Amino acid sequence: MKKIFNKILIAIAFTALVSSCQKDDLALNNPFVDINNLGKGAYVTLNSTTNVNLNSNSPDASTVGVKIDPYDNGVKIKEVKLYVYKGSSADPKAWKFIKTIPVAGTTTIAATGAEIAKAYGIPSADLFKAGQSFTFYHQVVTEDGKTYDISNTVGALESASGYNACMRWTAYVVCPYTSSMAGTYKVLSDTWEDSYPGDIVQITDGPTPNTLNMSAVWPGQSAAIVNPLIITINPVTGAVSLPSAGITFEKYASGTTYLAKNASGYAFACTGSITFRAQLFANGTSDVGYWSFSLQKQ
């Protein structure tokens, strides 16, 4: 019995030794286990936004752009190839090449309307319409000739705010705001569902210049008005904003009130379109996400 037991111990020891050797050789058999055997990519981060509005009245002379910084992970970035697409596309083959910009520390990435039109090969008058958006894509080129863009990097790099990655950005063709955009509008969309697509609403001017009262949409007929939802429009660009503290604009039968803040969007007098997006908070504190609506003047 003792002899058998000793043989069992020897067998266990041998198995442990083999297992240990296998673990030691794992990095050699599978090099991806060791992070030091993996290559390094490259990307740029957003330093600041310089301008993202193209004036529809003089698009060729308008310049849009951002400032970027190369992410310091030991990989030297040589340049950024700038591409553009009317709307958005994840397919690099659809992008239009604008130019190559050398990178040295904080670098401005910018393009004029004339450069965008040249990239498309069509006259500016046929390309730029108020309300259109253009997405600009960065293709990062390292000193050893490797390239990185949204097509060969993981989506989490962009979606995780901690990385502050700037692989693409969007510019809009805007038109100046007139003294009033009050009138009859059709609801095209409302993700918050205070109103519904096809509803006809009456939008009125706000109490001060360059403001509109959007209460006919939010809360519309869905809830009681706590405060009128008054948006402010930049007279030069048509960009929409709310007071920094936001506006508590509606109250439901349950007693829940909703605060809207961090608004964005555009009110384009030349096309009669209004887009609005804001972050909503239940009872002023509980974040329920971003919601939006769009309207078209009739």
Image (cartoon, rainbow, N blue to C red):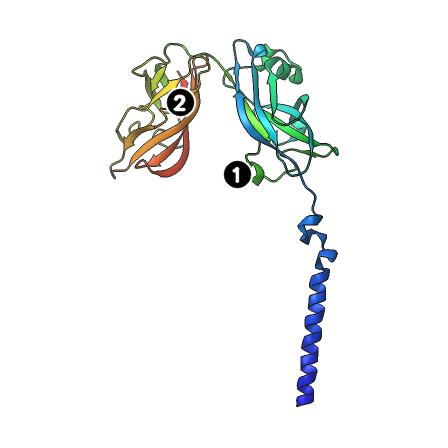
Q: Residue furthest bottom?
A: 1
Answer left or right for 100 relative to 252: right
| Residue 249: mark | none
Q: Residue at x 58, y 29 (%)?
A: 168
Secondary structure beneath dot 2 equals strand
Front residue (pair 131, 79): 79
Report x, y in % for residue 203: 33, 18
Disc marking residue 241 = 2
Q: Is residue 168 above or below residue 203?
A: below
Q: Which of 78 and 225 is in front in this view?
A: 78
Q: Quadrant of the C terminus?
A: top left
Residue 238, how many percent across, how many down? Answer: 44, 16
In which quadrant will I find the N terminus? bottom right
Left or right of 63, for residue 241: left
Q: Can residue 190 be seen in this view?
A: no
> Could you tell me the amino acid type at mark 2?
Ser
**Relative to the observer, which residue lies in front, 44 or 85?**
44
- Disc on the earlier residue, 1 or 2: 1
Q: Residues within 10 Å of mark 2 (few under 14, many from 20)?
A: many
The answer to whether the residues at label 1 and label 2 have Cβ atoms under 8 Å apart is: no
Q: How crowded is mark 1: few (under 14 residues within 10 Å), some or many (20 or more)?
A: few
**Where in the figure is residue 275, as x and y percent of width and height?**
43, 23
Residue 10 visible? The answer is: yes
Q: Residue 80 lies in what quarter of the image?
A: top right
Q: Quadrant of residue 64?
A: top right
- Horizontally, residue 200 falls left or right of residue 10, namely left
* Disc 1 target residue: 162
The amino acid pointed to by label 1 is Gly
Q: Is mark 1 on a helix, strand or loop?
A: helix
Counting from the top left corner in percent of width and height, residue 204 is at 32, 16
Vertical position of residue 208 compared to residue 20: above or below: above
Select label 1 or label 2 by which is in front. Answer: 1
